[in-house]
Amino acid sequence: DAKTTQPTSMDCAEGRAANLPCNHSTISGNEYVYWYRQIHSQGPQYIIHGLKNNETNEMASLIITEDRKSSTLILPHATLRDTAVYYCIVRAQTGANNLFFGTGTRLTVIP
Amino acid sequence: DAGVIQSPRHEVTEMGQEVTLRCKPISGHDYLFWYRQTMMRGLELLIYFNNNVPIDDSGMPEDRFSAKMPNASFSTLKIQPSEPRDSAVYFCASSLGFGKLFFGSGTQLSVL
């Protein structure tokens, strides 16, 4: 699976949009971009995933650049409960079904 | 659905003792994963199963670690003998095919 690069940490004011970037310049054509988050002392939680089109669900939006070398996870109205470590992962949906987590971005939502 | 269920929630043991961690995946899921999380190494994939068969155990640290999945609703991760460096949070996750992973609440293991 392709390697991803994320900032180590970010702050966001409560109620504002949180934009979390991820670089995945070596992504292959069949690899999807996945986002998970881990709230302190809990197991990771799936947020969203996409291949090349932008995606939106009840939790977040995922914007993938046209060349697919980077993406941005958007939490439209961050709350204190969104404070967590956010992991960006690229993964194919064939072959080995393993999911490797990097170091992620620690997002702190500030009141 | 109760989600992925792990037990125990916390385990404290002494070096040299055998430790068994348990996991019940979500019913109907055909993949089961064991992860370990430490401050130093982050989240590491130890092993995963497909239809109860181990597919990739390359992440298992050494022979002291073993994992089994005797049926679709139960898996164990065993450490024998345990060492202080095994102290970590161990997560179990399951998925349906290549779908999203659902994680359990984890087992906090402390080896003294």
Image: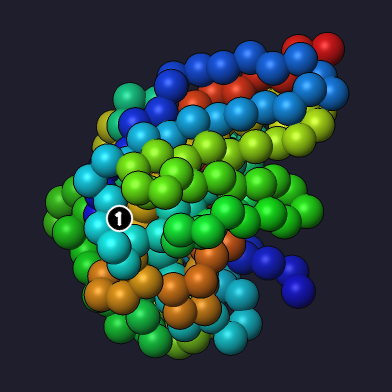
> Camera-side residue: B57 or B62?
B57
Q: Based on the displayed image, in which of its 4 quarters is residue B7 positioned?
A: bottom right
Which residue does the image show at 41% across and 28% down from the upper left?
A: A6
Residue at point 34% right, 43% down? A69
Residue at the outermost front position: A66
- B83 vs A20, left or right, is left
Left or right: A15, with A7 as reference point: right
Q: Nearer the viewer, residue A25 or B1?
A: A25
Residue A78 placement: quadrant = top right
Crowd tier of the residue under label 1, counting other residues whose Cα lies within 10 Å: few below 14, some 14–19, many 20 or above: many
Instruction: Please name the residue shown 35% across and 48% down the image.
Output: A67
Measured along the vertical axis of the image, is residue A72 above or below residue B27? above
Residue A95 seen in the current view: yes
The quadrant in which residue A73 appears is top right
Q: Position of residue B109 (x, y in %)?
A: 46, 40
Q: Quadrant of the C terminus of chain B?
A: top left
What coloring was used for the rendering?
rainbow
Residue drawn at 57 percent across, 17 percent down = A10
Q: Which residue is mark 1?
A: B46
For the residue pair B81 and A89, the one nearer the viewer reads as A89
Q: Look at the image and tell me whether residue B47 can be seen.
A: no
| Residue B62 image position (x, y, % from top left) | 15, 51
Query: Where residue B3 sits: x, y (%)?
Result: 68, 67
Point out residue A62 in the picture as x, y percentages from the top left corner: 59, 47
Q: Quadrant of the N terminus of chain B?
A: bottom right
In the image, residue A94 above or below residue A34:
below
> Measured along the vertical axis of the image, is residue B19 above or below residue A86?
below
- In the rendered view, does A30 fall on the left or right side of A8? left
Q: Secondary structure at mark 1?
A: strand
The amino acid beneath tag 1 is Leu
Parent chain of label 1:
B
